[in-house]
Amino acid sequence: MTRARRSSLQLEGKLQLSRRGRKYLGGDRIDLLEAIERLGSISQAARHLEISYKAAWDAVEAMNNLAEKPLLVRATGGEHGGGSYLTGHGREIVRLYRLLESGQRRILTRMQTQIHDIEQLNLLLRAIAMKTSARNQFRGKVKTLRRGAVNADVILDLGDGLEIFANITNEAVDDLQLQVGREALALIKASFVLLSPDRDIRISARNRLAGVVSKVIPGSGNCEIKLQLPGGRMLTAIVTNEGWQELELGEGSQCVALIKASHVLLAVTD
């Protein structure tokens, strides 16, 4: 079954003006002011915009309280206080807001034309937004995919000469629709990362990522060690304070991170 192609990511933004740390004007409030000016009453404008009269009046009151001059005059009489209309200052505020909004749209349009690979940006933003308990997340492309009777070996090319080996079930391969060339994320819990100052250490872990210790954050029982990898990537490991002292790792120390292929989780962002 072929997946339907999703539409390209569109660059959008809403114009929001604040005053003294409080929301002052946004598109919804400008819509309300325009509706009041057109219909002549807060109650009719609220019905037109499908909001409650209280919500509409609260918004008008907040705007009037924050403005240098009143934006709206409320006439007396009637169930909801009679008719209402914008002051000259209110009409000028609406005009200026729409002018700013038009300029913002032009800027966003120009920015979008300068983003040459919008789909790559889409993948990156969705990867950043992904919520997971794994401290380490690396994006790459599937370089090799070899199925076995139950599990599959997957090699993810991260670039800069870095590769991540993962061993996942064939069922997971099918669920993720993995194939050579597909972008994916490698997720690795910091507690699954072993460190060694000996780059030639003999161990069964398939992943060996060499780097330089950039930061050490001691805790009450464990220590967080950040390893700078090629390409500006950062790998985080959690080791016991005793283990840290035995390894004698400090900032600037050369070491290798060792990770079992079975401890690497893979995810896709679309």
Image: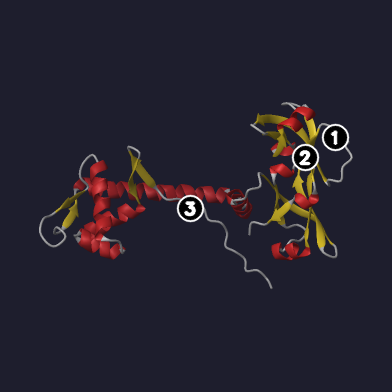
Q: Earlier in the sequence, mark 3 or mark 1?
A: 3
Left of 22 or right of it: where is 111?
right
Secondary structure category for the residue under label 2: strand
Foreground residue, 194 or 158? 194
Q: Residue at x 51, y 48 (%)?
A: 110
* In the image, farthest residue toward the bottom: 1
Q: Residue 12 bears which disc, if any?
A: 3
The label shown at residue 194 is 2
Question: Residue sitting at 81 percent across and 60 percent down?
Answer: 152
For the C terminus, give its image quadrant.
bottom right
- Mark 3 against mark 2, which lies toward the viewer? 2
- Residue drawn at x 85%, y 65% as measured from the top left: 149
SS class of the residue under badge 3? loop
Distance between the Cα atoms at labels 3 and 2? 43 Å
Query: From mark 3 to mark 1, how far is it between C-alphas?
Result: 48 Å
Q: CA distance from mark 1 to mark 2?
A: 12 Å
What type is the residue that disc 2 sits on? Answer: Leu
